Image (cartoon, rainbow, N blue to C red):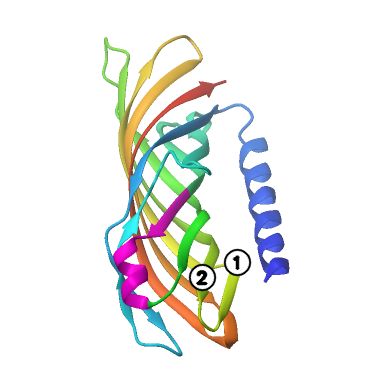
């Protein structure tokens, strides 16, 4: 599994390099953000135990905190200055609540070194003439790479895995604070299909919806 994750990371890095170097004359941007992220309950299927429903806590500011990094190419060079492509990584996370642990009989169940999300997205912005505000929307798809943390009577799992696919939608507004700098706030939602291996040859499946309200800063060149 670690080889698959390494291959995935290398492929993403190569894709980002090709994307951004081929767009050297376009408007480029790099953004960093944090915020408050949560997740509603989700059903959990376990291959060797009864299924159960997990209640999730986000704990956005607990270590390791929720954060994200995004690179964007605005397609000025092809005559579409308001259409963009972004590569977005977010360190989302979820903790099973006390009721879930009591119901399942597990002592530990988290994706807290990340329900890590890597997506390729299309963005569209709507400049408002005469103001510094620029609303935008976006959508895309990619993969989730969770750090699977499960402790139950039969054993313990604590490792990064390739969990499956994720889809993303976002909407926000940016504000020009200087020639090359913007601040922004946004909503970002991801729906992730997580299929993980746990101890004793068992599997765990759950679909997790994360909702985040982000604030961040962007540098453009």
From the image, which quarter does the N terminus lie in? bottom right
Q: Is residue 33 or residue 31 the one in the foreground?
A: 33
SS state under label 1? strand
Residue positioned 66% across, 63% down in the render: 5
| Image quadrant where residue 132 sits | top left
Q: Is residue 210 or residue 22 the one in the foreground?
A: 210
| Image quadrant where residue 52 sits | bottom left
Image side of residue 70 versus residue 188, left or right: right
Image side of residue 166 versus residue 135, left or right: right
Residue positioned 31% across, 33% down in the render: 172
Could you classify mark 2 by the number of other residues whose Cα lies within 10 Å: few (under 14), some (14-19), or many (20 or more)?
Answer: some
Magenta includes 95?
Answer: yes
Q: Is residue 175 above or below residue 45?
A: above
Magenta includes 207?
Answer: no
Image side of residue 22 versus residue 129, left or right: right
Residue beneath label 1, please?
A: 158
SS state under label 2? strand
The tag on residue 129 is none
Of label 1 and label 2, which has the lower sequence position? 2
- The answer to whether the residue labelled 1 contacts the one labelled 2, judged by CB atoms less than 8 Å apart, is yes
The tag on residue 150 is 2
| Image quadrant where residue 166 sits | bottom left
Q: Is residue 130 above or below residue 122?
A: above
Residue positioned 45% across, 66% down in the render: 109
Which residue is situated farthest in the bottom direction here? 48
Q: Position of residue 9 (x, y in %)?
A: 66, 55
Residue positioned 46% across, 61% down in the render: 110
Query: What segment carries the magenta color?
Result: 92-104
Could you classify mark 1 by the number of other residues whose Cα lies within 10 Å: few (under 14), some (14-19), or many (20 or more)?
Answer: some
């Amino acid at each position: 599994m670690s080889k698959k994750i390494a291959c995935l990371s290398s492929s993403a890095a190569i894709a980002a390099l090709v994307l951004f170097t081929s767009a050297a004359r376009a408007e480029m941007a790099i953004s960093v953000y944090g915020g408050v992220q949560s997740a509603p309950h989700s059903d959990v299927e376990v291959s060797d135990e009864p299924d159960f429903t997990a209640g999730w806590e986000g704990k956005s500011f607990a270590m390791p905190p929720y954060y994200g990094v995004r690179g964007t190419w605005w397609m000025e060079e092809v005559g579409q200055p308001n259409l963009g492509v972004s590569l977005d990584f977010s360190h989302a996370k979820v903790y099973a609540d006390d009721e879930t642990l009591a119901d399942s009989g597990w002592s530990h169940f988290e994706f807290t070194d990340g329900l890590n999300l890597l997506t390729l997205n299309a963005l569209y912005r709507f400049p408002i003439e005469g103001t510094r505000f620029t609303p935008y929307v976006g959508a895309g798809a990619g993969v989730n790479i969770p750090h699977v943390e499960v402790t139950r009577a039969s054993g313990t799992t604590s490792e990064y895995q390739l969990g499956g696919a994720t889809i993303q939608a976002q909407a926000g507004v940016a504000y020009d604070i200087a020639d090359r700098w913007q601040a922004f706030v946004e909503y970002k939602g991801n729906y992730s299909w997580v299929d993980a291996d746990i101890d004793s040859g068992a599997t765990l499946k759950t679909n997790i919806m994360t909702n985040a309200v982000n604030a961040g800063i962007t540098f453009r060149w």
